[in-house]
Image: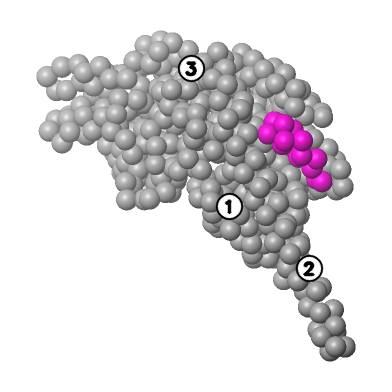
Amino acid sequence: MKNHKLRFLIILPLFVGCFTLFGQDDEDALFLKGIHDYTLKDGMCYKWLEHLSEEIGGRLAGSEGSELAVAYTAEELMKIADTVYLQPCQVPYWVRGDEEVVHLINSDGKHIDIGGLALGNSIGTGPDGVLAEVIEVFTLDEVKSLGEKGISGKIVFYNRPMDPTKIRTFHAYGGAADQRVNGPALAAEYGALGTIVRSLTTSIDDFPHTGVTRYKEGGPQIPAIAISTMDANTLHDMLTKDVVNVYMKSNCRMVAESKLSYNVVAEIKGSTYPDEIILVGGHMDSWDVGGGAHDDGAGCVHSMQVLETLRKLDYKPKRTLRCVLFMNEENGLGGGLAYAEASKANGEWHMAAIESDAGGFTPRGFSVDANDPIFAGLYRQLLEWDDLLQPYFLSFSKGGSGADISPLKGQNGLLMGFRPDSQRYFDFHHTANDRIHAVNERELKLGAAAMTSLVYLLDNHGLSFDDE
């Protein structure tokens, strides 16, 4: 009898321990279900996005649209957060001016009018425009090989497509973006009069895609215009048969190299570990064409929805939850740099930061980044939540996080990028077509619920930062 009693006393704690563990997993699963139920039924994110995209529209840093967006999101966040404030940052202020003009002219003098968008931060052509023979290249190295003899006095046409074989389209974008970002400055070094760049999308359509270009400090500057993939194919075909001249005219200019703007910061203070910050964020600014719905209105409202959902579910966070809507990601990163500088000056530590800047499509998971000594241990801890996230088709992968939160890497926290399905993102990226009609409400809300779920798990369980 004594032996039976002893056995019972030994087994009981083990049974209780297993029951407690099961109970915690069950509690987490129920809360994640509640997050998805609320967000999908009653979440505000689509309504917020509709206002940003359609009522305000383009929100390039320094513009009136960006100022309206700051005021609107701050007002909405005041209904949710404990604290909301505007954080100053310096941004460039570039304006597009009148609509661009691009003509293709063959040797018989026949004109073909095509659409174009000046690249962000580009100089304009002046009132008379630029007329010159066009030369087609596919790489920056090709420009260097042609040298001044082959480039001087011409308009350089960069026509390298995004690689359609890349399953993750961001990899294809990265493989082609150098011709837009650095191509005009390089062509200018060899005496080119202007540049035309194939739009960065796998789609063959009539929408030109803008985006930033960068000149070298103190170097020559020439006008740069993007044309649609369909028009790029037309120009390519013409060049295989004939000499082609291009006339291009743009009125864009940099109004101010530095202008005061703001990040919008909202937080709910943690009850147990208030000095440990979990950040969610996206960038407020968008290009001046379209409504910036996917890029990056979606990321902003995803992040706002995290706070709203947890408030509505009456969740009391242990750690400080902070939503940051960054200004000037598109053409300077002024907001991200200002935020990191202020955070360092205040002695803050971000346990985790999640950036949403890949559109409002169906969520697939999160890419994870951290400094090498701690990465492996943190990644193993995230994988322990696989069973909880699998019902929502969410997973973790090794990779980058986001431009605005990347300056926080020195704090030795965990950085993550929200990763929705990427197949259609570059159909809309930096175009006039990036409006609310391109965003599916359910997909947007699923993305917000995915981010909220991860924030809950990070806050409720924390992370161990041992580098073993």
Q: Earlier in the sequence, mark 2 or mark 3?
A: 2
Along the line of sight, which residue is nearer the eye, 443 or 417? 443
Disc 1 designates what residue?
Answer: 389
**317 part of magenta stretch:** yes
Query: Any mark on residue 96, and which?
Result: 3
Q: Position of residue 211 (x, y in %)?
A: 47, 30
Marks 3 and 1, Cα distance to the nearest angstrom?
A: 44 Å
Along the line of sight, which residue is nearer the eye, 89 or 192? 89
* Amino acid type, mark 3: Arg
Label 2 sits on a secondary structure element that is helix
Look at the image and name its color scheme: one colour
Along the line of sight, which residue is nearer the eye, 151 or 413? 413
Q: Nearer the viewer, mark 3 or mark 1?
A: 1
Label 1 sits on a secondary structure element that is helix
Residue drawn at (68%, 34%) of the image? 309
Mark 1 in CB contact with mark 2 (< 8 angstroms): no
Mark 2 in CB contact with mark 3 (< 8 angstroms): no
Q: Earlier in the sequence, mark 1 or mark 2?
A: 2
* Amino acid type, mark 1: Leu
Residue drawn at (46%, 28%) of the image? 439
Residue drawn at (51%, 16%) of the image? 54
Q: Earlier in the sequence, mark 3 or mark 1?
A: 3
Position of 129 relative to 141 (above/below): above
Magenta region: 308-323
Marks 2 and 3, Cα distance to the nearest angstrom?
A: 67 Å
Disc 2 designates what residue?
Answer: 16
Q: Residues within 10 Å of mark 2 (few under 14, many from 20)?
A: few
**In screen coordinates, is 125 left or right of 275?**
left
* Amino acid type, mark 2: Val
Q: Position of residue 30 (x, y in %)?
A: 66, 47
